[in-house]
């Protein structure tokens, strides 16, 4: 009988451990878009230029960032506002 109770408690501990690990994975840190925008906005004028958005990237990554910039610049004024910066692009999930 004692062995059965021990087995049940051990099994419960494993299940609880898995649930806590899954909860921790779901609640991991998510970056704040406002903080990222402020860090990218080097001259603090409230908009991002293509140079600020691409940053130090080079090669294929710079080209991809430039393409993303163009897709997010919905009014085609050459800068990204915070609203444009936070707009999702691509397929909806």
Image (spheres, helix red, strand yellow):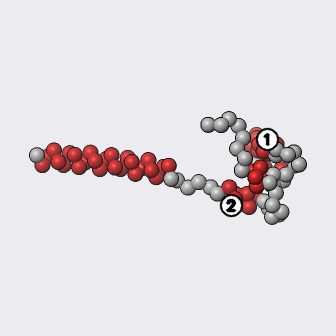
Of residues 83 and 53, the one drawn nearer to the viewer in this rendering: 83
Q: Residue at x 14, y 46 (%)?
A: 3
Q: Secondary structure at mark 1?
A: helix
On the question of residue 55 being in view, the answer is: no
Of residues 54 and 90, the one drawn nearer to the viewer in this rendering: 90
Judge from the rendering whether residue 47 lies leftward or rightward of residue 92; answer left or right.
right
Judge from the rendering whether residue 18 lies leftward or rightward of residue 64; answer left or right.
left
Gap in angstroms between the C-alphas marked 2 and 1: 21 Å
Q: Secondary structure at mark 2?
A: helix
* Mark 2 surroundings within 10 Å by alpha-carbon count, few (fewer than 14), some (14 through 19), many (20 or more): few
**Circle 1 is placed at which residue position?**
71
**Circle 2 is placed at which residue position?**
35
Residue 41: x, y in percent? 78, 59
Check if mark 2's residue and mark 1's residue have beta carbons within 8 Å.
no
Q: Residue at x 50, y 49 (%)?
A: 26
Residue 71: x, y in percent? 79, 41
Q: Residue at x 87, y 45 (%)?
A: 76
Q: Residue at x 17, y 48 (%)?
A: 5
Residue 45: x, y in percent? 83, 63
Judge from the rendering whether residue 86 lies leftward or rightward of residue 2; answer left or right.
right
């Amino acid at each position: 009988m004692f062995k059965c109770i021990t087995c049940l408690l051990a099994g419960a501990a494993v299940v609880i451990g898995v649930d806590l690990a899954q909860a921790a994975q779901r609640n991991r840190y998510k970056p704040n878009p406002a903080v990222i925008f402020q860090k990218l906005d080097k001259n603090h004028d409230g908009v991002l230029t293509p140079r600020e958005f691409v940053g130090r990237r080079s090669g294929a990554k710079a080209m991809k960032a430039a393409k993303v910039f163009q897709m997010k610049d919905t009014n085609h004024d050459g800068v990204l506002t915070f609203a444009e910066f936070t707009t999702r692009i691509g397929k909806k999930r």
